[in-house]
Amino acid sequence: MASQEDNLKKIISHCKEYGFVFQSSEIYDGLAAVYDYGQYGAELKNNIKDYWWRSMVQLHDNMVGIDSAIFMHPKVWKASGHVDGFSDPLIDNKDSKKRYRADELIEGQLEKIQQKINKEIDKAAKRFGDRFDEKQFCETNPRVLVNQEKINTLNKRFVKALEENNLKELRQIILDQEIVCPVSGSRNWTDVRQFNLMFTTQIGSTAEGASEIYLRPETAQGIFVNYLNVQKSARMKIPFGIAQIGKAFRNEIIARQFIIRMREFEQMEMQFFVRPGEEMKWFEYWKEARLKWHHALGMPDEDYRIHTHEKLAHYANAAVDIEFRFPFGFKELEGIHSRTDFDLSQHEKFSAKKLQYFDPEIEESYIPYVVETSIGLDRMFLSILSFAYHEEKLADGSERVVLKIPPALSPVKVAILPLVKKDGMDEKAIQIFKELRFHFNCQYDEKDSIGKRYRRQDAIGTPYAITVDGQTLKDSTVTVRYRDTMEQRRISVDELLVEITKDVAIEHILKSL
Ligand code: GAP
């Protein structure tokens, strides 16, 4: 069986070979943690954005979308807390010279202990079969209890150190837990230091007149500073939401796991403005709504889990992550945060502009509370590819790599293939192609054997392949081949539009939300 690392490597090389994702500036040996999306990657990304935008903006009466600038006034980031607090605690191993996030090393240690518990549970579940009671087992098994106690103690110490920003204590935890560098295997650690993740650049034409500004590390602040503009110009009444898709930049020190942690990435964020005191109701609403959005794509429920934050960011009074099972394990895909009135109050203070909302129902002015949903587009992209990538052995002994991308998101929806390029089959195929491309992203392909062409379409996740053969010219029927089952059906050319729309129309998914 392929290891988890192998699976990720296969996905990465597939992404390159078939034009989904390339290393940025590859001919110059690349730029770490920066990636370019190729011809199919760009299509898949656009389809994900479309699904998100339509589910948020089009399907909610009380939601509008904006597109704010990447550059913002530097005071925005002072007010939001990013200048002073948006940093990672870093530690170096003196032998390997590798740099790590201290909090991630400790989280890894917690995960290791948790895995010991999981192993005990798996063993017992096998031993006891149907009679197994997991809850009772966890409450009574001595080895589970000892490990659970270790987790609780370590977690308490860890959370306290983070809350107090106690870098010495973080280092001490790493030493006490005997955490070693995965590269050198040694425990020869430096001190822990904070490192701000924001990129800076200069704005203005002359050296003297230029001033330093930041590349936004999240899109959310563009929504906060525009909230009154939008509320007034769109005459929105609380509760209402503002959605946005856009680039964000973070100088991630540890770039790992492909497009999971990038220096330039894209976020799909939504801020929902609510009456103070009603934020928990909306927090629960959005948690459910966002889970439903993921599940509606048809990927297995067990590939998602909810992680509730114990240590809350300074601005939040509740937060959860929706995690996805990537090839290297569960990892955050989306965050849902109850951000209180922190951001708007800070902007009111720093800008000296009133940001209060007059609520006509209760005849009161207040600064709204905010519930945020924030999903990384690139992580969403990788979650789909992780689910979709399959290597299959076929009945005739051959193998195929197929991307079982949810059809509505597939980069190409239909391939139109003449069986051979003669006797008018190619002309008929081109005629069908020219008609269908008004409705879907289609591809016409006449090169190589039909088998090879099917494989190429499987590899990019095209759900339908239409073959035009000799019979087509007689009775205007074609064969439709279905990507996942490889089943082939003969249908009339006139039925194609309805047959294909059945599966690939995003409307069907949107209606199930
Ligand atoms: N406005 C809230 C916010 O930015 P976050 O948890 O820092 O919250 C939200 O980021 C989402 O953005 C994450 O759940 C993740 O999907 C994505 N994300 C964050 N940093 C990323 C990075 N360096 N590379 C790719 N995606 C990232």
Image: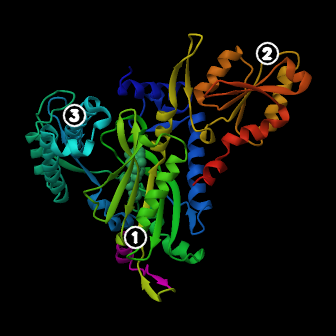
Q: Is residue 480 in view?
A: yes
Q: Are marks 3 and 1 in contact (CB under 8 Å)?
A: no
Q: Which residue is mark 1?
A: 279
Numbered circle sitting on residue 120: 3
Numbered circle sitting on residue 450: none
Report whether 438 appears left or right of 70: right
Label 3 crowd (10 A; few <14 / some 14-19 / many >=20): some
Ligand 1 near label 1 (Cβ, under 8 Å)? no
**Could you say which is closer to the camera, residue 393 or residue 442?**
393
At label 2, the amino acid type is Val
The N terminus: image quadrant: top left
Question: Who comes first in sequence, dot 1 or dot 2?
Answer: 1
Image: magenta residue range = 343-359
Q: Which residue is mark 2?
A: 420
Q: How far across and down, in percent of the image, does residue 403 sit? A: 55, 29
**Residue 138 sits inside the magenta stretch:** no
Position of residue 27 relative to residue 305, above or below, is: above
Question: Who comes first in sequence, dot 2 or dot 3?
Answer: 3
